[in-house]
């Protein structure tokens, strides 16, 4: 039977590799939380031609964030980024994929990323249900924030941690150190306002929520999501160790 044990760990002096997909994107409060724990951030944007490292020996771990592109896009930088995930996987280094980053991990592991069979999206706040496996690791919020039109199947060997109604697979763990989530716990208030303004054209898509529901939902649900993000950072990067014995 799995059991969780909390330990503290001295912060690694090496930076966390942060992979972003737009020129003005930031790691949001995920980056803030990492810096608050003493980590430096090495921010890279592959779509601008910035290369990713050949090894993780100079980094404590990696986070790949979301973006407007698809993991199925034919662009060379998208394919290279998906292939690059083999570096932290092969070296068993901490890796967290958020939204697009999660879908890229799925593609690297041989899984499928595709749109809903009925064209449904998740853009706004939607219910989340943790699995028994997920509950053994941490507490999960009941509502989470989404902004996507594609989902993913569960790769072979992965353990499902949380599920949703429209897109079932919402979070999983692969091996010891690779984690993926479909939703966004990293958004600051300013980021959400920017997404609501620039993404308003998507509110007409099936199952998408209007902008006022995005902002109202933040007042209702963000405290629990923020706490989850903090716990996830600690779990992935070693401050909250999971004992599998």
Image (tube, helix red, strand yellow):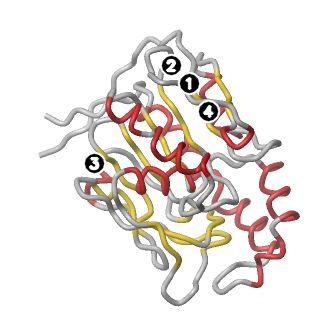
- Across and down, in percent, residue 229 comes to 55, 43
Q: Quadrant of residue 16?
A: top right
Q: Tell us which disc is closer to us: 2 or 3.
A: 2
Q: Tell me the residue at 83%/76% (across/down).
A: 201
In contact (CB < 8 Å): disc 1 and disc 4: yes
Crowding at dot 1, Cα within 10 Å, few <14 / some 14-19 / many 20+, comes out as many
Give the distance between the C-alpha atoms of the residues marked 1 and 2, in whole angstroms: 6 Å
- Across and down, in percent, residue 74 comes to 59, 60
Q: Quadrant of residue 208?
A: bottom right
In contact (CB < 8 Å): disc 2 and disc 3: no
In contact (CB < 8 Å): disc 4 and disc 2: no
Q: Which residue ends up furthest to the right in the rendered image? A: 197
| Nearer-N-terminus badge (4/2) | 4
Give the distance between the C-alpha atoms of the residues marked 1 and 4, in whole angstroms: 6 Å
| Nearer-N-terminus badge (3/4) | 4
Crowding at dot 3, Cα within 10 Å, few <14 / some 14-19 / many 20+, comes out as some
Q: Which mark is residue 100?
A: none
Residue 168, compared with residue 104, is above or below; it is below
Give the distance between the C-alpha atoms of the residues marked 3 and 1, in whole angstroms: 26 Å
User: In this image, 193 relative to 184: left or right?
Assistant: right
Q: Which residue is mark 2?
A: 59
Q: Which mark is residue 136?
A: 3
Q: Quadrant of the C terminus?
A: top left
User: In this image, 153 relative to 32: left or right?
Assistant: left
Q: Which mark is residue 16?
A: 1
Q: Which residue is mark 4?
A: 18
Q: Tell me the residue at 25%/58% (across/down).
A: 156
Element assignment for label 1:
strand
Give the distance between the C-alpha atoms of the residues marked 2 and 3, in whole angstroms: 28 Å
């Amino acid at each position: 039977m799995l059991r969780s044990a909390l330990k503290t760990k001295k912060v690694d002096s090496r930076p966390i590799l942060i992979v972003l997909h737009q020129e003005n994107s930031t790691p949001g409060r995920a980056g803030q939380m990492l810096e608050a724990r003493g980590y430096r951030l090495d921010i890279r944007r592959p779509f601008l031609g910035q290369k990713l490292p050949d090894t993780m020996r100079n980094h404590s771990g990696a986070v790949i964030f979301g973006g407007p592109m698809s993991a199925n896009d034919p662009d060379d930088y998208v394919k290279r980024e998906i292939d690059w995930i083999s570096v932290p996987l092969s070296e068993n280094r901490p890796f967290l994929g958020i939204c697009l980053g999660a879908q890229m991990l799925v593609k690297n592991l041989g899984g499928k990323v595709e749109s809903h069979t009925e064209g449904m999206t998740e853009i706004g706040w939607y219910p989340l249900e943790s699995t028994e496996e997920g509950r053994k690791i941490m507490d999960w919020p009941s509502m989470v924030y989404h902004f996507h039109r594609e989902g993913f199947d569960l790769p072979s060997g992965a353990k499902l941690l949380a599920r949703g109604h429209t897109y079932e697979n919402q979070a999983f763990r692969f091996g010891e150190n690779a984690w993926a989530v479909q939703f966004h716990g990293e958004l600051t208030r300013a980021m959400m306002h920017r997404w609501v303004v620039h993404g308003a054209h998507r509110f007409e898509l099936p199952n998408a929520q209007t902008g006022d529901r995005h902002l109202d939902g933040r007042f209702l649900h963000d405290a629990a999501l923020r706490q989850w993000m903090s716990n996830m950072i600690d779990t992935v990067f070693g401050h909250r160790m999971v004992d599998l014995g």
